[in-house]
Amino acid sequence: MIAKEVNPTCSPLGPDNKLILAPGILAGTISPCSQRVSVGGKSPLTGGIKEANAGGTSGQKMGRLGLAAIVLEGKPEPGRLYTLHVSREGAFLEGAGDLKGAGNYKVAETLRAKYGRHVGVISIGPAGEMLMSAATVAMTDQEGIPARHAARGGLGAVMGSKGIKAIVIDDTGMPKIVPAKDQEVFKKITKAFAAVILERPRVKHRLHKFGTAGLISFTNEVNSLPTRNFSRGQFEKVEHISGEAVVALIDARGGQRGHSCYQGCIVRCSNKFMDAEGKHLTSSFEYETIAMLGSNLDIYDLDAIARMDRLCDDYGVDTIEIGCAMGVAMEANILPFGDAARAIETLHQVGKGTVLGRVIGNGAVTTGRVFGVERVPAIKGQGLPAWDPRTALATGVTFVTSPQGADHTAGRLQGVMEFDRLKPGTIAQLSKEMQIRACFYDTVGLCHFADGTPESAEWLVKLLSAFYGERLSVDYGMETGQKVLETELNFNLAAGITEADDRLPEFMLKEPLPPTNGTFSVAREEIQEAFAGLKENKKS
Amino acid sequence: MIAKEVNPTCSPLGPDNKLILAPGILAGTISPCSQRVSVGGKSPLTGGIKEANAGGTSGQKMGRLGLAAIVLEGKPEPGRLYTLHVSREGAFLEGAGDLKGAGNYKVAETLRAKYGRHVGVISIGPAGEMLMSAATVAMTDQEGIPARHAARGGLGAVMGSKGIKAIVIDDTGMPKIVPAKDQEVFKKITKAFAAVILERPRVKHRLHKFGTAGLISFTNEVNSLPTRNFSRGQFEKVEHISGEAVVALIDARGGQRGHSCYQGCIVRCSNKFMDAEGKHLTSSFEYETIAMLGSNLDIYDLDAIARMDRLCDDYGVDTIEIGCAMGVAMEANILPFGDAARAIETLHQVGKGTVLGRVIGNGAVTTGRVFGVERVPAIKGQGLPAWDPRTALATGVTFVTSPQGADHTAGRLQGVMEFDRLKPGTIAQLSKEMQIRACFYDTVGLCHFADGTPESAEWLVKLLSAFYGERLSVDYGMETGQKVLETELNFNLAAGITEADDRLPEFMLKEPLPPTNGTFSVAREEIQEAFAGLKENKKS
């Protein structure tokens, strides 16, 4: 819809952009791990097309309501702020002046008190209202915590530009389950696919137990954990922020792990992290957050990092982008590396919208520009996630080539294979396949953690066949994914994003990554060759 | 040289960019008005190739020294700062730690005291040291005032990134005049060309008398004078900032007008503006400055505007870019429109490098991003000069298409014809021709004020023929200009700047310009057609 209806050269925060919130095709069904909501628009951060998705309960509820998408378009008078209430009665705008400037926690609480604890709340914090390019779209989880964010690319600012503070998804009166055309077959495939997912070592041994935080020790070991603004791949204090350390605190303080952000998720990577007094601090304390606000800032106090996570969730900013921006600000000596108190204070400035806060809240590139920093970890305007491309080569190719900018959800290679030095000549091709697969998963609404083998796409095709009641070709998944990727690349080309933008930040090409001195050794020609097919299609 | 030697995708402030200072071909000769210095590099503001030129005495001195160019490349250790001394003895680097953070006025004074009042000084202020994207390269005039700036595109930041605080051009011991191969013919043509220039009504009736400030009343009349962040084309208080008002104050306070910024300039548009006590406030108080820091900010106190001009010269920032950025900040209510004291205080923040100062000092686009402003007058990252494209149509096409970003020196249509509603279908072609001519003038080092008719290019070709002692074709000028323009477009294409970037800011397309409700009525197709030839060459 974005590609069809939005002028690629329009101003992302102007009336011609649209914000589209779409659950996956299988939303509301019993299919496992497939209730995510995609948020799309032209990104104010990258200037290109953007898809960012999140879990939480709203996708399922939109599915139950039979909604293919919610589309926000146009632009209200300046200063107007609304809540959009969506139920089987229809969609209604209500004034939201009382929520002006409110954090996502307060918004979720207020709207759940008003409309019932069962509703899903999709909202923006003050960052979205202030049109910051790192602003997120927050979604409530099963406990009503606004901890699930379509975080990347500043789509919260697009929502802010539309004057929509929150969307309430109220599925009252709708059947709990959206039936497939062939529900019996659908059930059987669901059961079999679920068993496969649960048997995956990653799910079994890590995600259930540690959530994504379990990745910290791993990426550190393979020298890919961003440390002090991507100047190292290993963090000296890693044991203080590892999955084990997180879990120990969760368990000691009466937190919770292994829970799911929506009904029917069997991966259950989510966790609840309590403060020293046993009070809820943040929900789902994730790998990316711990790395980008932890090691990347030389901070190893988990309580401080969790506090920052909560503030990011509340103010509505992307922890990855903020981690990158804050690392750049530290590089510029605006605040010192390792100073958790100053980092927290700076985050409050983001929420308040001081000038410094607005700089940081507009992401790494703006921060680098303002403070004259050369070492800015960003591609196509978007800050890098916590996978240093100088060791995570295939994921690095995704960062470089993805129409989304540097994005680990656009096609990340899983596991040790990535770091075992992939065979040269195969890496870019691998990235391309991962990207196509990722596009397909996002279309269906599948959580990437339910992936793990190329067969996942085939399982999904089987589910879709039963859902539609028609036999789809086994290639349907990859074909769909490729079509999506091409559409995105096309949009970007028309928006002025070209192959010249397919580059790592210069410092990453010039500095090998200590301590192993990894370099991004994938030849530019290899990348060009692998993606040539897509490019040709683009030009035709 | 930039196009040949600089990687178009390099980081503008990294070691791979180069800063090139080149006088025109005729530097040091007796040719009239042709002693300007071109400064070039990849722009940190636009991300494209950049040529910005300035008057002052250094071009002539470089010509006398027989220098084709001074090339700064590589990058020193962080924190190092040097002065480069260039004379017939060679080029030598000296530590400039004592000048760290100094304004251009102090730098010029210090170095002229040290090396003699006769030297030319090319320098950066604190803005250049802080790598701000609006930072200029300042050049001293005949009185040693650093009032001449290669201002656009942030080339001062590139100089700062090379650790060069100042370049001293010392022509001691060199003959005063660089002879042409055929000096007798050269003399004759010079005399004839000079007579033609002096007869031009623009020179005779405006530039001698009012300097460029004389344009204020004119652009106001034709509804093209930027007022309150380009929201109007006429300024209610225009009589307070007109050329007549400027001249009245200059005369009353013992200032000076009609003087020249280098020996041999016969246009003599320069002026000296004194404060109420008769003390020197600024030299050459120009149209662009008065418009962008005056009407565009709703400020009509000439003393305040002149004070801001001096501060911009001293801190080393572009008055156009700062005027645009400050207008955007006013639009965001960071400071009020019309508040001269606050505007001056904000400029001091630029010099000091406070966070707000750094935001403003990085130009209009960064300011708009940080404060979430939609109405940002910029193209390809560069702020618009004081010619509203909704009435200045041909100049508007130049803003849109020039590889320099919005730039009035890249090909501006002179005089009333522009506003007399040009014939549709001819406007884009006109812009293209002006751009080609401008490229040729900049190559030769000609001041654009010596232009005025298409024959100027032919006069220059005659001069060059005598200079080289070989008969150049009459088309040589336009051929050279076209080659330069194509080279620039090529560089930009490789840098990722495409036709998608050839656009007015969205608000200018959506809002007719009060009070006459002018619109940028040039069809996109007309522009594409006119520039198609260049584009085809680019792709081959």
Image (tube, coloured by chain):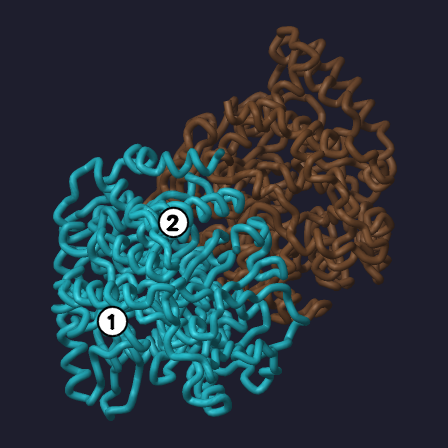
Chain colours: A cyan, B brown
Dot 1 corresponds to which residue? A299
Nearer to the camera, A21 or A162? A21
State which mark lies toward you, 2 or 1.
2
Residue B358, given in percent of the width and then of the height, sits at 50, 61
Q: Residue furthest top?
A: B470
Element under label 2?
helix
Element under label 1?
loop
Q: Is residue B28 above or below residue A16?
A: above
Q: Amino acid at mark 2?
A: Thr
Residue B143, given in percent of the width and then of the height, sits at 65, 42
Dot 2 corresponds to which residue? A480
Q: Please count the marks in the image.
A: 2
Relative placement, left or right, of A383 versus B256 is left
Q: Residue visible at 33% across and 51% down?
A: A477
Nearer to the camera, A483 or B186? A483
Q: Earlier in the sequence, mark 2 or mark 1?
A: 1
Real-space CA distance between mark 2 and mark 1, rounded to the nearest whole angstrom: 42 Å
Q: Is residue B349 above or below residue B450?
A: below
Answer yes or no: are tags 2 and 1 on the same subunit.
yes
Chain label for disc 2: A
Check disc 1: other Cα within 10 Å, few if <14, some if 14-19, many if 20+: many
Q: Amino acid at mark 1?
A: Ile
Q: Is residue A345 visible?
A: no
Q: Residue visible at 27% across and 68% down?
A: A187
Q: Is residue A46 visible?
A: yes
Check disc 2: other Cα within 10 Å, few if <14, some if 14-19, many if 20+: some
Q: Quadrant of residue B350?
A: bottom right
Q: Quadrant of residue A206?
A: bottom left
